[in-house]
Image: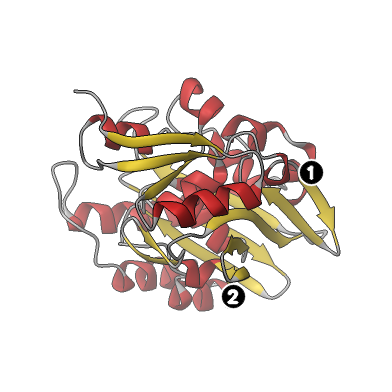
Amino acid sequence: MKASIAGYARATDLKHALALLAQADSQARVLAGGQSLIAALNMRLSAGDMLVDINHIAALKGVRCENGRLHIGALTRHAEVAADPLIKQHAPLLCKATELIAHAAIRNRGTIGGALAHADPSAEFPACIVALDATIHVEGPDGTRDIPASEFFIDVFETTIRSGEILTAISLPIAEQDERQVIHEFARRSGDYALAGVCVVRRSAGHRVVCISVAARPELMTAAMAQLDLGNLESAVCALRDALDPPTDTQATAAYRRHLAGVMLDRAMADLNGAKT
């Protein structure tokens, strides 16, 4: 089946991209890596929209440290996330997550901004940026907005990005000297979406725990975090499982996903308490 689109336009800069979106009057889709969008178009899950290609906008690329924060351009490819020295230093969680994402062809095309805007709760990057306490930067006809990652995701495939806005960058605190970051997930086959997983970040302020593939959106597991701060791993695993109400589907039952999430937290903490990451 072929995709059905209303047209295609390549934006030369951010201002041009925003103008194209405005002209389309909510009937346009932003094309970055296209790994999810093109598949949806080919299956006619989305049709009749104009594609605004932002791949050539230099302002949306690059990684830098500025004012105590790590800034990652929205067009940074998954493979670039894995290889970037600043990300390895300050957000190794993202590097580790990249190793779990699909396959090389997808990692070479997919962008971190596109993955976040797509808001698939089974994907790794959304959970990672919530665990890292990141900020999402968007720009639209009314100017720029800075959205805490914990407030960015609303539901499955739904975010707080408004019509006519473009996700431009992600920023997060640079890593503390003794900070640890780990991710563990369980998938049926390498490259598949996880049946369940967890991201854990330990900072001086305490632990941050976010699950993968067990809810409609990534959220901080505050009860489990409180128990980890007290050093009670067994209680933290119980608190995590009690807080979850995962879906049952053709891949796994809710009970199995809940069990796996606890196992992944246990493994993540064993990893975190071992060699420094």
257 with respect to 90 (left or right): left
Which element carries disc 2, helix, strand or loop?
helix
Q: Which residue is mark 1?
A: 86
Instruction: Tell me the quarter of the image containing the N terminus.
Output: top left
Q: Which residue is mark 2?
A: 229
Label 2 sits on what residue type? Asp
Rendered residue at 56%/55% (across/down): 167
129 with respect to 48 (left or right): right
- Closer to the camera in the image, 273 or 63: 63
Which element carries disc 1, helix, strand or loop?
helix
**Residue neighbourhood size for the residue with mark 1, other residues' Cα within 10 Å, grouped as few (<14), some (14–19), many (≥20):** some
Residue 5: x percent and y percent?
Answer: 30, 35
Label 1 sits on what residue type? Leu
Residue 116: x percent and y percent?
Answer: 49, 52
Asked where in the image residue 258 lies, by quadrant, the reply is bottom left
Q: Please determine whether, in this image, residue 184 is positioned above or below residue 231.
A: above
